[in-house]
Every structure is written in C-alpha cells, then in structure tokens.
Amino acid sequence: MSLEARVIAALDTVYDPELDEPITTLGFVSSCVVTEAGDVSVRLRLPTPQCAPNFAFLMGADARAAVRRLPDVREVTIVLEDHYTGEEINAALGRGDDFASAFPGETAGSLDALRELFQRKALLGRQARVCQALLEEDGATPETVLARRVADLPDTPDAVRVAALRAALGLPHDPDAPALIAGDGGSLTVSDLPTWLRRARLVSLSLEANGGMCRDLLRARYGNSEPEEIAS
Amino acid sequence: MYEKDGEKYYIFDSHLHFWDASPDNWVKGHEEYAKGWIECFHAYQGLGPADTHWTLEHFQKYSADDFEKDVFQNGGVDKAVLQSTYLKEWYTNGFNDIDQNAALLDRFGDKLILNGRWDPREGNAGLEQLEKDHAQYGIQGVKLYTAEWHNGSRGWKLTDPEAVPFLDKCVELGIKNIHVHKGPTIWPLDKDAFDVSDIDHVATDYNGQLNFIVEHVGLPRIEDFCFMATQEPNVYAGLSVVIGGLMHARPQFFAKVMGELLFWVGEDKMTFGSDYAIWEPKWQIEGFLNWEMPDEPQFADYPRLDMNGKRKILGLNAAKLYGVEVPAEFQVPGAADPAAAVGVEG
C-alpha cells in the first residue's frame, strides 16, 4: 500500500466527535498531499466558518495524531481552512499543543469530557439502530434480542462501531457481553426496553439529522462534498 | 392569513429579523467574522427551494419594502415578532439591534411585535438598558444569544450567577417570553456550547413566571431539548430552522423530527418561526399546511398532525404567549377555554 493510501486510511479512522462519522466520508478533508520525502499536508474544511471550535480542534488534533503514527511519515501539517478561530487552532496544531494552549484563559479543562459525552451519545444512537435491526429479524422478541451477545452481532458498520465505542469508554465489549447495554454498562431488562429504545432512537435521529444538515451546508458552501484534491 | 380547503389559518411568525450585514456595517479588523456570519446564514438559505434563493448582496441588506413584500404581502403573515440580535463585536451598528428593528414599527406597527435582548456580562449598565428598552418599546419578550462574543468572552450560560438579576428584572417588568438561541461557543470553550441543561434549570426556577421558547428546538441537540421540554411546562419548541432547514432539503428527517417533537413536546407547545430573512415565510407556510406524516411503517408510531394542530403551531400558540387576540374564525372549533393552557400568557 502506498504511503498516500495509508494516510487516507489513517484519516478514515478520524471521526467527527459530534456526528460520529469519519471526516473523510463527511467530505471534511479538502486536500491531502504527500511528498516523495514523506511530508504530509492535510487541509480540513467544515460546513460553516462558525462550526464549534472545540469539535474542530479535536478533528484536527486527531488527524495529526493518526497520520503521525504511520511509519515513513516525516513532517505532518494540518490546516483548518476558512474558520473563524482557524488562526488559533492552526497555530496550536502546528506546535502539537492542546486545546487549552490554543485559547489561553478560555478553557476550564481538557476536551476529554466533551469527547466522552459524545461517545456516550453515539453509543446510544448506534445501539438503537442495532436493536431495531435485531427486532426486525424473523421470530425476534424482546427476550431473544436482549439475550444476544456481542459475538452474535452481524458484521454491520453500526455493530462494529458499537464495539469500538464500548472499548473506548471502558464498557464491557468482550464476545460474551450482552449485545445491548444501558448507558452505565449495566444490562437492560425487557421492561426497560420500550423506553430505552424510544430515547435511543431520538438520539440516533438527532445525530443523523445533524449529519444531513452538515452535508447540505458543506455543499452549499463549497458546491461539492467530494474532496477537491487528494493527490501525491 | 391563509386559506386551505375552506379552513382559515392565522399566521403568527414568532421569529424573524430585519438585519444589516452589509460591508459598511462591518467592524474594522473584525471583517472576517462579520463576513463569515452572514455567509453562513446565506448557506442556510440554500437549504430552501432554489427559486427562493437570494444573491449574497441582497441577503446582506434588504429594505423595509422587501420586508413588507416577503413577510406581509407574499407571506400572508398576520403578526410577527422581530427578534433583536446585536453582535456588536462584528457589526458596528449591530446585526439588528432594537432601534434598527424599531424603524419598522412606524410602518407596520399593527403587525409587528418588537423583542429586546440582554447580556448578563453587561452588568448594571445592561440592566438599565433593559429598563429603558422596556419603557420605550413596551417589550414583552427578549431574544438571548448565548454564543455572543463580548470583551474577550465567547459566550455565557443562563445558569451564570450574573444572569439572575436579568431574569428577575424580566419577571418584575412583565417581560415573560424568553427566546433562547444557542450558538457554537461558550465560556469555557471546552464545554458543549449547544447544551440546553442551563435552560432546564432556569425553566424550573421561573416556572409560572417566565416562558422559555427554545429556538431551533435546541438543534443540534434536539434529543436533549425533547427530554427537557417533556418535563418543563414552560418550555416551548421554536420551529425556526426545523421547517426552513429540513422540510425541503431533508423531508424524511423533517417528518421524523416533527414526529419526535409531537411525541415529546406536543402540538400545544410548538411555535412557527420563519427565521426570515434566512428563509421567506411563504414556501414554509404553504409547505407546512400541505405536509402530512408519511404513511410508511417507519413513521407508524408518531402522532399525526391535523389541521387544528397546524392552526396552533402556525399561529394560536404564539399568539397566546404574546396576548394577541385571534378572531373566532381562526380558532380551533369547540376548543376548551384557552386560559386552561400551560405557560404564562400574555
């Protein structure tokens, strides 16, 4: 696999923390240039100049970390384009610094809590879709669905992502763990299921609707959600 | 006023603007913010039907004649609430401050209701200004924008201690409708700026005294908004952006979002707002009157919305909040005493 292909594959693992979708499929990578010497330059663009600075920073920092982890990569430059706090964010990314150093005096802590909050939302929303799919199988009942284990889950993108989020959050994710769990990692009962699913479905809808609106705004802003240039 | 299938609908647009974002009004040194803000709004207009799109130049600044044509003549709006948004760090005379909005009162005073604003970071000077605005214009409501930048701060929360005197002042003056709009920044910057839990707190504290109309139904945090609004009798769902941003661009999402709002919040607590000049009211009202929950399995367990529900959302609910009397021909036939409704009425 060429270095360019590996860089793109690394960027595929970077998620918009608010939408829980890869920045590549969202169209947020506007260009990615890899030189023969192994220097990598990635430019990111967002649906509006006013997208929240904290999420914007997380995507930039995660992209930088993911590319730097690759062997044969030398200098990594990540630039956030056309953003109203782009100057502060790009300077901190260039230094390899954290969010607090990008906005001195304007933060109370790190972005870890924000990231975790949205991982929990994403987990709930994804589990709603997994649960819905299981309930629609022939002969499924709430009892049979709740008896399923992680190992029984189909190999769908939602199920794969659920396992990754559970691992990231330190929640049970071994093959024998229940396929669906409550927010605290505990098990769900048949009587919990209707209310849990109603709430989880709304979270799923919220994430999807926000993703749809972001795509529409990106298209309105740049005319095309496909990357302008991904080349070596 | 609209008529469809022999039924008449009173239109109360609870959220619109008369702004000036033209380059002449950009603050020197902050031009990129002023430009970015209005271009962002303009992109939102792109989510409406193509034949309703404006040029950026026209969108930056439109005239009182445009307003009259789009809102009253073509839009058929009977009563509208002008919301004030300052953003004076970026726009020299404000984006649309109360005095600029008030210029329309001379021409359309019988159709317009003017709302003010406040910002807790302005302290006593802000409280005095609120009193002045109330004395001069008799405001019944304010629009709060928590992501406004002010002297190095990029936002605030309703639970900040500095907000208490302002909320108390609203109770004292009878400014009972608090429209809240969340934006992308807050202090501290590492928190989720769109979080609505601060509204939850103050809605509980001021229940029976103040109404909280959450604009854009808390988007992009509609789930948190719904979980809150279902428990708080004085929290309302402002539909601006839901209709304008989703009904045309993403009809399937629009139907699901409406279904969730009808389930969690209910048709008595949802209010129409066009968010003009982001979108013209006409296509939104016509589209909403024609809209029905799709007859497909994935929408099966959502409540339905009939013409009486549409009457409430398009006009009656917000008219009640602002104490506007709506003639009997527009009322829901056989409705119970309107005074039995929730919230603090006008």
Image: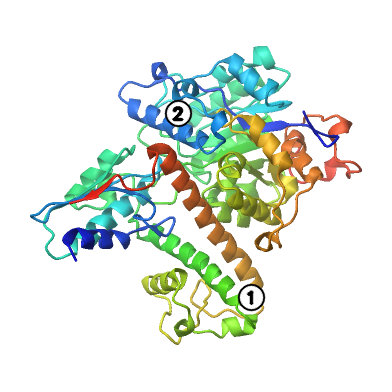
> Disc 1 designates what residue?
A192
Instruction: Indicate left or right for B206 with B120 as reference.
Output: right
- Residue B107: give x, y in percent of width and height: 67, 12
Q: Nearer the viewer, residue B42 or B161?
A: B42
The quadrant of the image that shows the C terminus of chain B is top right
Q: Nearer the viewer, residue B162 or A188?
A: A188
**Amino acid on which the number 1 mark rests in the picture:** Asp
Q: How is the image coloured?
A: rainbow
The quadrant of the image that shows the N terminus of chain B is top right
- For label 2, the SS is loop
> Disc 2 designates what residue?
B87
Q: Nearer the viewer, residue B175 or A136?
A: A136
Rendering quarter of residue B297:
bottom right
Image height of A165 relative to B200, above or below: below
Give the residue drawn at x 75%, y 49%.
B305
Q: Residue furthest right?
A: B334
* Observer able to see residue A104: no
- Residue B22: give x, y in percent of width and height: 43, 19
The answer to whether tags 1 and 2 share a subunit is: no
Q: Residue furthest left?
A: A37
- Residue B93: give x, y in percent of width and height: 45, 19
Q: CA distance from mark 1 to mark 2?
A: 46 Å
* Observer able to see residue B170: yes
Instruction: Indicate left or right for A176 with A80 as reference.
Output: right
Instruction: Indicate left or right for B265 with A114 as reference.
Output: right
**Amino acid on which the number 2 mark rests in the picture:** Leu
Rendering quarter of residue B318:
top right
Image height of B124 relative to A185, above or below: above
- For label 1, the SS is loop
Q: Chain of mark 2?
A: B
Rendering quarter of residue A145:
bottom right
